[in-house]
Image (cartoon, helix red, strand yellow):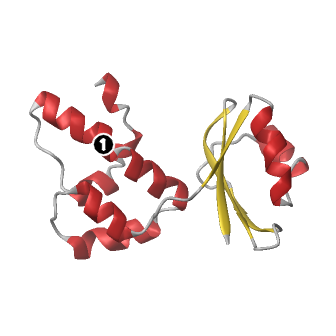
Amino acid sequence: MTKYILTSVHYNGAVQFEYDKAGLMLFYSVLDAELNEKQLFRLLQKLPRDESELAPLNENGYFTVKKLSEDLSFESFWMQYEKKIHPNRCEPIWKKLSDVKRLAAIKAIGPYNHYVEKTGVAKANPENYLKKEYWKTDWSKE
């Protein structure tokens, strides 16, 4: 199964698509995207039912399509976060996150670590990082 994340300049969040080995769409999720009714209707009209239909979306300048090739497992998050406190409380929170949120959480660890080092602020426990969605903060502007 191949997964893709679609983002747009027209809305916050992302839409996830999953395709089988033949390139046919099996699943899509708009749970992480903040779409109004008109945007949702337009997305459904242009729904990329085949994997090959994603490329034109990426070329029009309004959308970005990224293939999910990263390891989005809890173990990957745990190894990268470095502060090892209460894994038994963190893993259930991780499992409830969508792939879009998992990807964002992992990608924000580096900027968050830099912020912590720069400011001397104590690093949050991984449970709080996940519960309070620290990855949504633009740490480079803090």
In-image side of 72 versus 29 (left or right): left
Query: Residue 116 lies in what quarter of the image?
Result: top left
Is residue 36 visible in this depiction of the protein? Answer: yes
Q: Left or right of 58: which side holds 95?
A: left
Q: Is residue 53 above or below residue 39?
A: below
Residue 35 image offset from top left, x and y in percent: 69, 42
Could you say which is closer to the camera, residue 60 or residue 15? 60
Dividing the picture into quadrants, the one containing residue 100 is: bottom right
Q: Position of residue 3 (x, y in %)?
A: 65, 62
Judge by depth and name the residue closer to the eye, 106 or 94: 106
Query: Going 45% across and 57% down the picture, which residue do you hit?
Result: 102
Looking at the image, residue 20 lies above or below residue 68: below
Residue at the outermost bottom position: 88
Q: Position of residue 138 (x, y in %)?
A: 38, 31
The picture places residue 54, in percent across and down from the top left corner, at 79, 49
* Secondary element at image label 1: helix
Is 51 situated above or below 104? below
Residue at the image point whose x is 28% and y is 68% from the top: 90
Foreground of the two, 67 or 131: 67
Residue at numbered disc 1: 110
Rendered residue at 75%/28% (across/down): 61
Name the amino acid type tagged 1. Gly
